[in-house]
């Protein structure tokens, strides 16, 4: 074995596919969809480190071009929700956007369980059908 092979920063014999979401340091490899999901986890970690009591929320339409977001969240399993981020799949873009908008009123809710919510909505733009043609 080449002595220089072990000094390669990309050589990680202990690398796991789940590192795309859960690794805390080092190099990771991820898709664009995984980057969106990881961004939510990183925001939660950043807020927690700053002493902010926030939670995350993701909603969107499974038929959108980013429809694999739901699969990435479901693959992360309960650990994702335990990290303080909730996922709500929507039956269309408007309901997903409405759910996300609703999370931004948490400070006015007398039964709130956190100080604020950061959220992400995914879907295709309103007025665009599945083929991408304007309606």
Image (cartoon, rainbow, N blue to C red):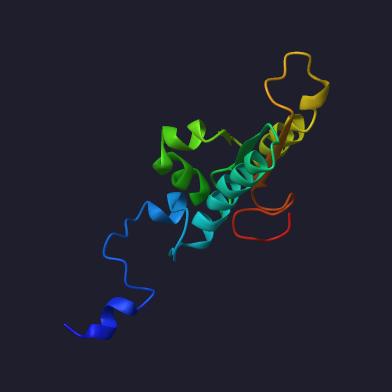
Percent of width and height locating residue 116 = 74, 32
Left/right placement of residue 135 relative to residue 49 reads right
- Farthest residue, direction top: 111
Farthest-out residue, left: 1
- Residue that lies at the very extreme toward the right in this rendered image: 108
Residue 106 vs residue 15, the one in the foreground: 15
Using the image, determine if residue 104 lies above or below residue 124. above
Residue at (66, 37) in percent of width and height: 96
Residue 43 on image: x %, y %: 63, 47
In the image, residue 85 lies at what x, y percent? Answer: 57, 35
Q: How many labels sit on residues? A: 0
Front in this rendered view, residue 28 or 97: 28
Residue for point 55% across, 47% down = 63
* Front-lying residue, 109 or 3: 3
The answer to whether 10 appears left or right of 60 in the picture is: left
Q: Position of residue 66 (x, y in %)?
A: 56, 53
The correct choice, above or below, for 55 with respect to 46 in the image is above
Q: Which quarter of the rendered picture does the C terminus lie within?
A: bottom right
Q: Please tell me which residue is depicted at 53% across the width and 61% down the height of the picture.
A: 32
Q: Residue at x 16, y 82 (%)?
A: 1
Determine whether, in the image, residue 114 is placed left or right of residue 22: right
Res 107 quadrant in image = top right
Residue 110, quarter of the rendered image = top right
């Amino acid at each position: 074995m080449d002595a220089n092979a072990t000094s390669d920063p990309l050589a990680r014999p202990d690398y796991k596919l789940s590192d795309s979401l859960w690794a805390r340091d080092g190099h990771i490899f991820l898709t664009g969809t995984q980057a969106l999901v990881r961004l939510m986890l990183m925001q939660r970690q950043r807020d927690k480190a700053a002493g902010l009591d926030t939670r995350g929320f993701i909603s969107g339409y499974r038929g959108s071009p980013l429809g694999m977001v739901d699969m990435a969240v479901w693959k992360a399993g309960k650990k994702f929700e335990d990290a303080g981020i909730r996922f709500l799949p929507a039956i269309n873009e408007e309901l997903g956007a409405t759910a996300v908008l609703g999370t931004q009123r948490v400070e006015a809710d007398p039964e709130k369980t956190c100080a604020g919510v950061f959220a992400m909505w995914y879907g295709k733009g309103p007025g665009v059908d599945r083929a991408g043609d304007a309606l």
